[in-house]
Image (cartoon, grey):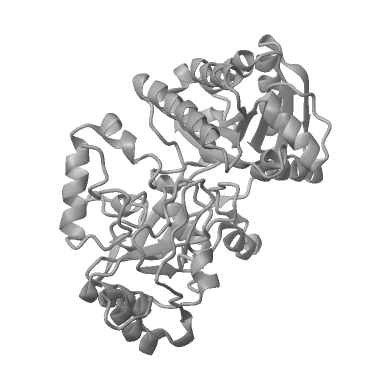
Amino acid sequence: MDDLATPAGKAIAELKTVLGDRLATSVSVRDHHSHDTSRLKPHLPDAVAFPRTEEEVQAIISACAAHGVPVVPFGAGSSMEGHTIPVRGGITLDTREMNKVLEIRPEDLLAVVQPGVTRKQLNVELRETGLMFSVDPGADASLGGMASTRGSGTTAVRYGTMRENVLALRVVTPDGTAIRTGSRARKSSTGYDLTHLFVGAEGTLGVITELTVRLHPIPEAVSSAICAFPTVAEAVEAVIEAVQYGIPVARVEFLDEVAIAGVNSYSKLDLPVAPTLFFEFHGTPAWVEEQARLAEDITRSHGAIGFRWTTDADERAKLWQARHDLFWATKAIIPGYDLYTGDICVPISRLAESIVAARADIDASSLKGQIIGHVGDGNFHTAYLIDPNNPEHLREAEELADRVVERALVVGGTASGEHGIGMAKLKFMRREHGKAVDVMKRIKAALDPMGIMNPGKMGSEEWSA
């Protein structure tokens, strides 16, 4: 691990003089950084670094570059496709101590933060301004990690993903150079769009050390609604019509009957066990009521049962907390089982058929599984409960998940709407992007010729030929 004869040992010895006890080599700390929330096999890093400044990030990357040692950026560890697993060892660079909100500019609707700041932390600091950071992936993820995976979540249909909400970055590149991308201006026509090259690069091109993010006004009024449907198809078709009608929903979430049963048990709700939609509307009091009424008319025309809406803050909070706890609610269905998760995104016109087909696959399998989704933008998630000690479960879950992706690609969709590629979905990159993969690999080779940044992930030789 820290044998001075090895490249990692040499880098560790050099970095101990810079970081002191913020360079950890204990098994417990390394084990914590050996995995994410995916089902993929963990792998220990040689050490874990906890920098506090951009200069320390530069020192870490420069030392690793000098000795040819891998660097794996790490945020909150909530990714779901193996992004932060250090498959070749090296130094995991944990940004948790880079957690300062550096500047809030209400008049410009922006904030400047370090990468370890979490979305909840930022919104707490924004309370007195009347503004909010809108991207909500469910987990209290770090903003650096959310940018690296191009994250989104329940509110993306109204406010956009991290792609739309990151204005500028500071990044340390694989040779230890710190650069700034973008500006505080809302638009620019100068140069390559490097900001959005690093947003979604999953730590393979550099380490984000600062983000300038877009803020949004907290709405004057918020209402939520919930309704069940006889079938999956009717629920999703109602969403498609609502979006095409132009109702500016802030959130619209789909949960199938398995997910609802899990939510009822785990979060102590009493919802009808049926395919269900959760809506949220933002605006003035009159406008949120009108949006709810329009949504009610549309959903009832598709067979909705028991549409009910509320502006009560406590009731809304309980509903959305139950949605955010769904990962744990699903795991609790069969104690001791793991979740094999996946997500795809399709053109909204193909959403209903995609979800119906995915549900039919689960029903025909030997596994218990569920489908949920941020269906207002065509994004849905599958989760299959598997016995981690049963190879047949793993094989069957992989086949089911692959089938969902393959159908998405056929209709012009993507292998991931928000989870990202990590290691689990590298095999689909060539199918989705064709010869553009070769351009991506050339970008990776140009910026990281030694291949030290998060190796085994995007841009590496593991990409399918």
User: Residue 192 location in percent, x, y?
Assistant: 21, 51
Quadrant in the picture for the C terminus: top left
Number of marks present in the image shown: 0
| Side (left or right) of 434 relative to 87 | left
Instruction: Say if residue 210 shows up in the picture.
Output: yes
Q: Nearer the viewer, residue 370 or 416?
A: 370
The residue depicted at 27 percent of the width and 46 percent of the height is 462
Q: Residue 360 lies in what quarter of the image?
A: top right
Residue visible at 40% across and 63% down in the picture: 73
User: From where the camera sits, is residue 100 visible?
Assistant: no
Up/down of 246 relative to 38, above or below: above
Q: What residue sits 51% from the left and 47% below the top?
A: 38
**Image coordinates for residue 171, horizontal then vertical, percent:** 32, 65
Q: Position of residue 121 (x, y in %)?
A: 60, 63
Tell me the quarter of the picture where residue 229 sits.
Answer: top right
- Between 132 and 52, the one lying in front of the other is 52
Q: Extreme bottom residue here?
A: 17
Q: Is residue 158 left or right of residue 16?
A: right
Image position of 20 with respect to 402: above or below: below
Quadrant occupied by the N terminus: bottom left
Q: Where is residue 452 in the image (x, y as percent from the top left)?
A: 26, 63
Foreground residue, 54 or 66?
A: 66
Q: Does residue 281 lie above or below 247 as drawn?
A: below
User: Where is 2 relative to 233, above or below?
Assistant: below
Residue shown at the point (71%, 45%) measured from the top left: 321
